[in-house]
Image (cartoon, rainbow, N blue to C red):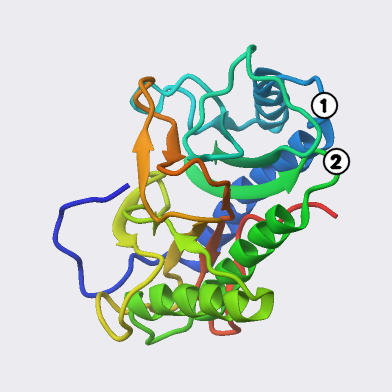
């Protein structure tokens, strides 16, 4: 989501203890995502996946951060095939073999937020869809690698963009970087300034310092960069019906390099 307030000079930062607390929230999210992926089989509804995630989150003593957020009804966003982000889980959306599924999940533990997304297939994916997900993951990892002290916000944006271009060269095809959506600051609120674009020129925006935290979340498509929102006022789909992928981790800047706060159990 895009926020309009003026940027501070540094990306908001946390103490080491606060990062540990965020990592505890992030571990709940990681566990929920793994459980959802395990449950994502042909014939299963996206509402059933939502129930799996909510159970894991509440069993850990945490609260789903999405549920009720501006009226959102689910504990996860389940975005299948041409849905980019913010898909509402329903009993009527039934998964089929070959579906490309993006699950975005958030949890609040002791007042701190974790936020992460994962794209995977229901069974085997066709090569184009598998490579799309891989390209999105590589773009995210390039952004994570740029989470270094004294980098600027748009250094991370530029790194994500370069990650996408590198994946294009490796895969021998073009990807659309979804226009208008990106990552964000996160802490005791899920969405905080600054907004993190997934492309752009380097060297601009607030400075990263030790303890700065961002949710890094590229969204790529097999076609257009343009999207529209469905009549439910939430679900974002590609304008041309092409498939989309979404990867996200909550990441902190540390003296020892980037720290992923939303690790998933093996």
Residue 81, given in percent of the width and then of the height, sits at 61, 39
SS of the residue at dot 1?
loop
* Distance CA(mark 1)–CA(mark 2): 8 Å
Using a 10 Å C-alpha cutoff, classify the residue at mark 1 as few (fewer than 14 neighbours), some (14 to 19) or many (20 or more).
some
Quarter assignment of residue 20: bottom right
**Vertical side of 84 occupied by 135: above or below:** below
Which of the image's four quarters has the C terminus?
bottom right
From the image, tell me which residue sits under label 1. Answer: 42
Q: Label 2 near label 1: C-beta < 8 Å?
A: yes
Q: Which mark is residue 123?
A: 2
Q: Nearer the viewer, residue 74 or 258?
A: 74
**Vertical side of 1 occupied by 247: above or below:** below
Q: Nearer the viewer, residue 137 or 153?
A: 137
Q: Please give the name of the residue rendered at 42% of the width and 37% of the height, measured from the top-left corner.
A: 236
**Vertical side of 231 occupied by 215: above or below:** below
Q: Earlier in the sequence, mark 1 or mark 2?
A: 1
Using a 10 Å C-alpha cutoff, classify the residue at mark 2 as few (fewer than 14 neighbours), some (14 to 19) or many (20 or more).
some
Task: Note whether residue 151 is visible.
Answer: yes
Q: Which mark is residue 215?
A: none
């Amino acid at each position: 989501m895009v926020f309009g307030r003026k940027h501070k000079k540094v990306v908001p930062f946390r103490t080491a203890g606060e990062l540990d607390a965020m990592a505890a929230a992030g571990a709940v999210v990681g566990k929920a995502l793994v459980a959802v992926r395990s449950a994502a089989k042909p014939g299963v509804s996206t509402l059933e996946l939502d129930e799996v995630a909510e159970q894991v989150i509440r069993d850990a003593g945490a609260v789903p951060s999405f549920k009720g957020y501006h009226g959102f009804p689910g504990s996860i966003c389940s975005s299948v095939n041409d849905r980019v982000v913010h898909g509402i889980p329903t009993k009527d959306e039934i998964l089929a073999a070959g579906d490309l599924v993006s699950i975005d999940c958030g949890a609040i533990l002791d007042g701190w937020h974790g936020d992460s997304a994962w794209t995977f297939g229901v069974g085997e994916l066709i090569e184009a869809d598998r490579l799309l997900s891989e390209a999105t993951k590589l773009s995210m990892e390039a952004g994570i690698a740029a989470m270094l002290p004294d980098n600027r916000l748009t250094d991370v944006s530029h790194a994500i963009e370069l990650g996408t271009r590198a994946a294009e060269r490796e895969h021998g095809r073009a990807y659309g970087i979804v226009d208008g959506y990106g990552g964000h600051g996160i802490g005791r609120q899920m969405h905080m300034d600054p907004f993190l674009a997934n492309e752009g020129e380097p060297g601009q925006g607030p400075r990263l310092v030790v303890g700065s935290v961002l949710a890094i979340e590229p969204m790529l498509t097999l076609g257009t960069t343009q999207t529209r929102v469905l009549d439910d006022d939430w679900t974002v789909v590609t304008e041309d019906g092409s498939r989309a992928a979404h990867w996200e981790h909550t990441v902190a800047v540390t003296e020892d390099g980037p720290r992923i706060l939303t690790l998933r159990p093996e």
